[in-house]
Image (spheres, rainbow, N blue to C red):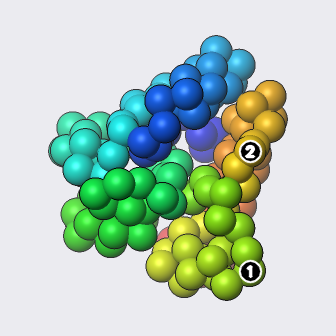
Amino acid sequence: MPLDKILHVEDDESIRVIVEMALVDISGLTLVSCEGGHEAISQLAHFTPDLILLDAMMPGMDGLQTLHEIRKNAHCVNIPVVFMTARIQHTEKQEYLDAGAVDVIEKPFDAMSLGDSLERIYQAHLASAKINHPE
């Protein structure tokens, strides 16, 4: 099953624009962009993405708090989350993975390959889910 729908949560408008170009214009994906955690949670009431791309450092509700709130929604428990952040030291990356993220993408990122990177992460997640929970 190919990656199709992404929820992107990012407070920096310029990064949201670049991600939209990378994922919609270049990769042909469906994208809903949010500028913060509260908006993302309200979007999830009527948009179920295949993957959530989540900024780590945001005012108000940071990425880890947003992930925690997202996981409270029963229909969002198994949606893979990928953090996108400039804070990529090993301990920070491990904190995101321990919180339930499936991967971490470092900022600055390559816009031309972002869609392919997310597709690879998504397919690896699906394969892992099948191995860990065979039907």
Q: Position of residue 99 (x, y in %)?
A: 48, 79
Badge 2 crowding class, 10 Å Cα cut-off, few under 14, some 14 to 19, many 20 or more, is few
User: From this viewpoint, which residue is outermost toward the front?
Assistant: 59
Residue marked by disc 1: 90
Report the amino acid beneath label 2.
Pro
Q: Position of residue 7 (x, y in %)?
A: 43, 41
* Residue at 66% over, 74% down: 93
Asked if residue 79 shows in the view, the reply is no
Q: Quadrant of residue 23?
A: top right
Left or right: where 112 falls relative to 126:
right
Badge 1 crowding class, 10 Å Cα cut-off, few under 14, some 14 to 19, many 20 or more, is few
Left or right: where 21 falls relative to 101:
right
Helix, strand or loop at label 2? It is: loop
* Residue at 23% over, 50% down: 38
Marking on residue 108: 2
Helix, strand or loop at label 1? It is: helix
* Residue at 72% over, 55% down: 106
Report the amino acid beneath label 1.
His
Q: Is residue 4 above or below residue 69?
A: above
Q: Quadrant of residue 94?
A: bottom right
